[in-house]
Image: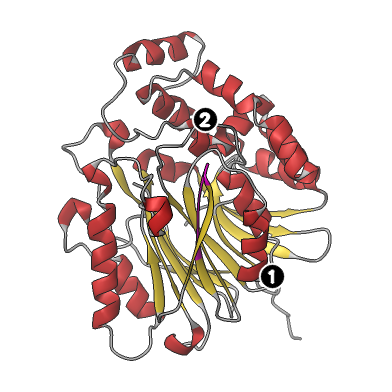
Amino acid sequence: MFPLIELSGSAYERGQQHGLAAKALVQRSIASYARLFAYCGISWTDARQMGSTYRELIGDFDPQLLTEIEGIANGSDRHINEILALNARTELLPPSYPGEPHPDRSKVLEANGQESQPDWGECTSLAVKPLQSATGTTLLAQNWDWLGSQRSALVLLRVHGEAGASYLTLTEAGMLAKIGLNSQGFGVCLNILRSTDDGAHPGLPVHVLLRKLLECHSVEEAVTLAARQTFGASSSVMCADAGGQTAALEFSPRGLEVMHGTQAALCHTNHFLAPTASKHQASLAPSLSTVPRLERATALIDMAQGKFSAADLQRMLRDESDGYLSICRRPDPALDVDARIETVASVIMDLGQRVMHVAPDVPSLVDYQAVGLNPPAPAVLKG
């Protein structure tokens, strides 16, 4: 299982605890993204500079989140611009990734090495309403598809806030949040999208938004929060609440589109579903398999009988019927190693029970393990 780190105290203290506990893994994240940016022709020096441009934007959005990032930088003994670059990695990656490598990749890797920087499709998500779940609670699930090398930098953060609110998130070391749920029974998943407008202007990093969304009580509150923001890159945040509301928040530099869940399950992969936004869809590498994954997930839902159980969702997320293009993705050896996407983890969240079930590898290879939002009570010794 991924390391589980307990955080509490002020924003700066939580960040510092994160950085101290995951110092080696933050280094791993930086090494992985330095190589990934090099694949795109961006040196780590340039990435740090680009990350610095988000400092004021994040501070204006929520000063406490910037303070938390400063704490991560201090605790991990890294420059704040590096932590900013990690949290804005989606916005810094060009829309063309994971296409062909940039012709300057070798030169950039060499430049990274001279600076002592070490060398070292995204996802399928779905939400199930309480009336259609065997548990009678809202279920939110995702296969997180990314670079296999980054699996060793993943952490679980169980955070206890100053005001009593808490959240549990599976994220990358050095980053505020990603997939998660909170004590109000609200949860989020992430699917990266690409539009022809990405990079047209600066905008709020999606991983910063995910952290802020984990303070929400409901899908309605999340929609209101997201609608007020300006975005520099495209993503879809699948969200759900314990009351049974589900929605995919599709946003791009053009604004926000909301796809409300009206059927038993709402599914999303890595292309726009909203008709208006889909007109500005950027071309995607066939290796992302976003359309066949969505079609297969929809077919599996249509074939299901009765209510969805956690076991049903596990079977869906372990589906390998389309080889390397399946919902459950193994790395394709025919692709460049820096474009070889695989399922790094799989998550099923029970928002009623506030429990996250995590498969810490390609889910067809491992069991799911339960991690509760609340740590287990200490055993009581009886005399």
Looking at the picture, tell me which residue is in the foreground, 264 or 274. 274
The image quarter containing residue 77 is top right
Q: Give the class, few, some or many, for how many residues have Cα within 10 Å of label 2's Cα (few <14, many ≥20).
A: many
Amino acid type at circle 1 is: His
Please say which color scheme the image uses.
secondary structure
In this view, the residue in front, 25 or 343, is: 343
Whether residue 45 is situated above or below residue 315 in the rendered picture? above
Q: Is residue 96 magenta?
A: no
- Residue 74 in view of the camera: no
The local secondary structure at tag 1 comes to loop
Counting other residues with Cα less than 10 Å from the Cα at mark 1, is it few (<14), some (14-19), or many (20 or more)? some
Q: Amino acid at mark 2?
A: Ile
Residue 263 position, x and y percent, is 40, 80
**Residue at image location 20% in from the left, 62% down from the top:** 320
Disc sitting over residue 30 in the figure: 2
Q: Is residue 256 visible?
A: yes
Q: Which mark is residue 228?
A: none
Closer to the N terminus: mark 1 or mark 2? 2
The label nearer to you, 1 versus 2, is 1
Whole-Å distance between the Cαs marked 1 and 2?
33 Å
Vertical side of 285 occupied by 53: above or below: above
Query: Start and end of the magenta stretch?
Result: 248-254
Q: Position of residue 285 (x, y in %)?
A: 26, 40
- Residue 169 picture location, percent across and down: 58, 57
Looking at the picture, how far across and down is residue 328, in whole percent?
28, 59
Residue at 60 percent of width and 81 percent of height: 243
Q: Residue at x 51, y 68 (%)?
A: 247
Q: Quadrant of the C terminus?
A: bottom right
Secondary-structure class at tag 2: helix
The residue tagged 1 is 217
Magenta highlight: main SS = strand
